[in-house]
Amino acid sequence: MSLRIALLGLLTAAGPSSGYDLAKSFESSLNYVWQAGHSQIYPELVKMAADGLVTADAEGARGRKTYTITPEGAEQLRAWLMEQTPSLTVRSESALQAFLLPLLDPQDAVAVLDRLRERYVKKLEMLEALCADTSAGEKFGRYALDHGIRHVRTTVEWADDTIADLRARG
Amino acid sequence: MSLRIALLGLLTAAGPSSGYDLAKSFESSLNYVWQAGHSQIYPELVKMAADGLVTADAEGARGRKTYTITPEGAEQLRAWLMEQTPSLTVRSESALQAFLLPLLDPQDAVAVLDRLRERYVKKLEMLEALCADTSAGEKFGRYALDHGIRHVRTTVEWADDTIADLRARG
DNA sequence: GAGTGACATGTAAGAATTTACATGTCAAAA
DNA sequence: TTTTGACATGTAAATTCTTACATGTCACTC
């Protein structure tokens, strides 16, 4: 369901798009909260067309197919947003790694956390640069970007404090 | 891989456990960052035993089987923690919902965000209660719990600010 | 004119995940 | 004593997700 919703959302925000466009959009905007590659997107668009949620243009240059959301698709997206009670859980490999850190001795844990922290700092810088770029303040990007930045910042702070705590113990 | 690592982590932290125990542990401790039901855990334990990462006791009362991590399992866990560079991406249905919110008109978006916020507040209270409980300060629970609390708190703050912004616009 | 790289779409196989089905034990309360 | 609920383990089917394979176009550069 989530993939479908994500695609309907992207089609609403960005207007008619090809599967290729949508895969790109996924990478650049939705990537922080959901992921999907083209091999998942293309077949899903076909199913969505069969279900009347989108319509496909005839092929354009280089076999390009442009999909447009239908009123039915828009309605389904709206219904999901208004009525669904999505799970509050999260799936995060790096959070899993962070969780298991105390199983290492403190020095090793610090080493691992340091590396993880470094990567989050990079990510934070990247997101903040995006935020400063005025052109990025479009569509649903604003709140989402803010959400992402806050979360990554929180993670870095947590890493700082946890490293300090581990150092104090080790 | 993540499921395997999570199970090895739980077995290390909690000592020898049954699949049932592990499923419970998953729900109560790892749940915020990874999820797995018993129907995924039981077969995985069998495979892990075949791979020499755990050993299974003979059956106890009510068909209970107790699994113990082997040195090889411990080594694999350690190697993953020290050497892997896990993805920084996250999969979160509620974050997806939050992202798509601006596609609704502001009043509707506020209504949805309000509901979402309410649920996060509940979750925050739950986690803070857990934190206050001294007995919860065991094993790898401390840092993980702190991590979870900070993230949920950040989400609530984001929701507050986003609701205010939406109200100002709507 | 050949090569490179972004554009563009697909399929197939396998792994991971979810949901539902299916079974049986033991202890305690009603 | 029956019934309820936690304990305990599994399998099957369906869906979702990842990784790899496979193909072809178009614009630009060397």
Image: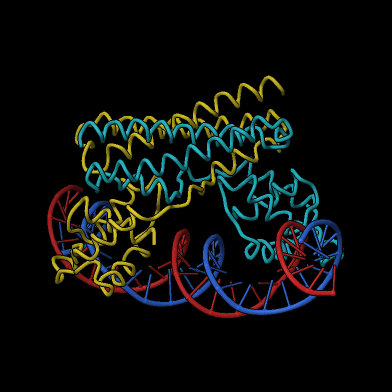
Chain colours: A yellow, B cyan, C blue, D red
Side of A100 where D26 appears, left or right: left
Q: Position of residue A97 (x, y in %)?
A: 59, 42
Q: Nearer the viewer, residue B82 or B46?
A: B46
In x, y percent, where is residue A58? 14, 72
Query: Is A156 displayed left or right of A2 in the figure?
Result: right
Q: Nearer the viewer, residue B141 or A125?
A: B141
User: In which quadrant will I find the C terminus of chain B?
Assistant: top left
Residue depicted at 73% across the width and 37% down the height: B139
- Which one is in front, A58 or B85? A58
What number of labels is visible? 0
Q: Quadrant of residue A103?
A: top right
Q: Nearer the viewer, residue B154 or C10?
A: B154
Residue B50 against residue A121 in the figure, above or below = below
Query: On screen, A126 above or below B38?
Result: above
Q: Position of residue A86 (x, y in %)?
A: 43, 52
Q: Residue at x 40, y 45 (%)?
A: B95
Q: Quadrant of the N terminus of chain B?
A: bottom right
Q: Percent x, y for residue A63? A: 19, 69
Residue A79 location, quadrant = bottom left
Tell me what residue is drawn at x 55 percent, y 24 percent: A160
B97 vs B129, left or right, is left
Q: Residue furthest top?
A: A168
- Asked if D13 appears above or below A45 in the picture, the reply is below
